[in-house]
Amino acid sequence: MSIVKKLVDVMNGSIEVETELGKETKFTLVLQHKVADNNLFLTKTDMSLVDEQQILQGKHVLLAEDNDLNAEIAITILEDMGLIVECIEDGIQCVTKMEQMPAKSYDLILMDVQMPHMDGYKATKTIRELSDEGKAHIPIVALTANAFEEDRKMAISKGMNDHIAKPIDVKKVEEVIISVLK
């Protein structure tokens, strides 16, 4: 309490104590502050964050995820960020989509690493070998339960641009996507 009292005094405030023996004690702090207008809160970092979030608006994401629940969660998170999401279930479908669609149809691929028929590493390798440079150089981000640093290094060594660990951290997803789309 002595620390609180000193802080209250430094801030030119007051502290009141009400107590009932054997029941409760109530402390009331009174501090005076100026009311800030909204412009004070919109700092340069906030402005750059707004600019960065605008990078996501309307971008097309191909989500390769074989687990229905994980796909549903990821789609909700991505759409809340302003992204347009198309979901497929395995690496073969992902490669087929990339081969069939014109270059620039997608801005990013979020690739589960462990999928049936063709895993995310093999799908990434196949996409990187496409003859169409626009398709071969699409940003690909691993989306995996393998969350250690060596897993991240593995994803990058296999041709992926970055790595997002499951369970999905919304802020981390946003940061990674913005960084690969810049």
Image: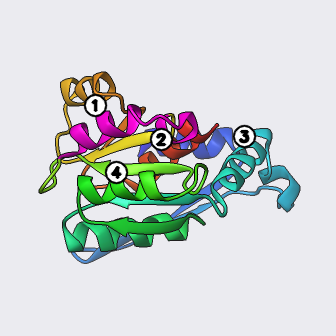
User: Magenta region's main secondary structure?
Assistant: helix
The relative height of residue 163 versus residue 144 in the rendered view (above or below) is above
Q: Is residue 65 visible?
A: yes
In depth, the one of 18 and 146 nearer the eye is 146
Would you say the residues marked 3 and 4 are in contact, meaning their CB atoms lie under 8 Å apart?
no
Label 2 SS: helix
Identity, as a three-letter code, of the amino acid under mark 1: Ala
> Upstream in the sequence, badge 3 or badge 4?
3
Pinpoint residue 52: horizontal percent, then vertical percent. 68, 46
Question: Residue at (79%, 40%) from the top-left corner?
Answer: 44
Dot 4 corresponds to which residue? 95
SS of the residue at dot 3?
helix
Residue 108: x and y, percent? Answer: 50, 49
Q: Earlier in the sequence, mark 1 or mark 2?
A: 1
Q: Which mark is residue 45?
A: 3
> Which element carries disc 1, helix, strand or loop?
helix
Check disc 2 and report the residue beneath it.
Answer: 176
Pick whichever of labels 3 and 1 is earlier in the sequence: 3
